[in-house]
Image: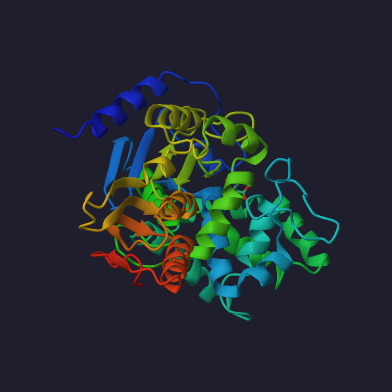
Amino acid sequence: MRNPIPDLLDELRERCADDDGGEVLSTIPELAKADPDRFGIGLCTIDGTVYGTGDAEHRFSIQSISKPFAYALALADRGRDTVLEHVGVEPSGDSFNEISLEQSGRPRNPMINIGAITTHALIGHEGISRKQRDKRVQQGLSAFAGRKLDVDEEVFASEQSEASRNLALAYLVHAREKLDGEPHHAVEGYIRQCSLLVDVRDLAVMAMTLAAGGRNPVTGEQVVPTWVCTQVLSVMATCGMYDASGQWMSTVGIPAKSGVSGGVLGALPGQAGIGAFSPRLDEIGNSVRGVRAFEALSADLGLHLMHAPEVASHVLYGVVEPDADGDGLREVQLQGTMHFAAVEVALRELEEVPDGESFVLDLSRVASATDVGRRLLLEAVERMRADRREVRITDPHDILGG
Ligand code: DON
């Protein structure tokens, strides 16, 4: 095979597999049965290519990794303002099942149990029945995965029988009037949500859907609006790995979410969706090998979000000067993606065009533009034309059109 990526993932998995630290969760009986040595990694790209290594097809209950997706559904169904009235967006600094409420009674964020149960109760339209909500959650998460996800009834029953703490959290929020509906219904629905079965390939596709602005790269379905993904990824970045979130962001630098069954999901905007699974957990509750795998992936593949690529300096493909005898037009040729920083470089180049001189703005090597980039370029062209300058635009990909 010419593509080195499968070998690279196999090798990376091997390297992380020698770590047998940590313990399988013992508090949920059905999860305590997991084979501690399982280890799989999945990776999905923006065009929907999915790579898998190790136990890539082994299914496990999604657990807390369902939280960002449930948050996405609540945002899409009820809007940002309503969701923010009920659940905050600040890291709690507490463990995942703590009573982390703000003064107002609002849970601190949707990634800890108290906030996730409250978020679950917001999914669907107001007054939706429990059954319909369960269906919406199952369908919604399935749309993120690109295949129908099923509930593991044994895991569900096991967690339902040990739900005192989650019930206590739900009743507390209800008493503060931030949880809609019956607390025990919210907990039951939340536990069903946590019991959905996935493998690491599913996690990779789900993550890539978030990282691609809500469009599932495999099915092509727009699962949630793009603004929802921006909100969800932001909260994952600050709150996704419990009280290790700050350390995670500095070492791995990929918005992520972990779960007690041993899964870790990471979504790097515009680039990759990653899933890892290995049941032994560290003392914070994150998969030991899962964390190792993400650290290695981030370092080996240069995936740290804060490691900014140097795009702005390559915006200018070239400038063609007019002939000495005055024939021909000056041509300013741009390339790449016209986001704010790139366009800023381009605009300064346009300033260099001598007064009164006509020129060609060549966008044939430009791949895409953000709204801001397009707006700024159009504004500059308009100003130059208002200056009675002739500006010709070569725009075969209709970058400025849409
Ligand atoms: O509610 C619970 O405690 C579990 N269903 C899920 C918790 C979880 O995955 C937290 N993650 N580390």
| Residue sitting nearer the eye, 174 or 158 | 174
Whether residue 260 sits left or right of residue 317 in the image: it is: right
Can residue 365 be seen at all in this image of the molecule? no
- The residue that appears at 72% across and 52% down in the rendered structure is 164
Can residue 159 be seen at all in this image of the molecule? yes
Give x and y (percent) for residue 195.
Answer: 50, 54
Give x and y (percent) for residue 75.
Answer: 58, 67
Coloring scheme of the render?
rainbow
Whether residue 263 sits left or right of residue 167 in the image: it is: left
| Residue sitting nearer the eye, 179 or 242 | 242
Whether residue 4 sits left or right of residue 78 in the image: it is: left
Q: Which residue sits furthest bottom? A: 127
In this view, 57 is above or below 360: above
Task: Give the quarter of the image for residue 303.
Answer: top left
Give x and y (percent) for residue 237.
Answer: 58, 45
In this view, 110 is above or below 23: below
| Residue sitting nearer the eye, 7 or 226 | 226
Q: Which residue sits furthest right? A: 103
In this view, 352 is above or below 401: above
Q: Which residue sits furthest left? A: 1
- The residue that appears at 60% across and 74% down in the rendered structure is 78
- The residue that appears at 40% across and 50% down in the rendered structure is 270
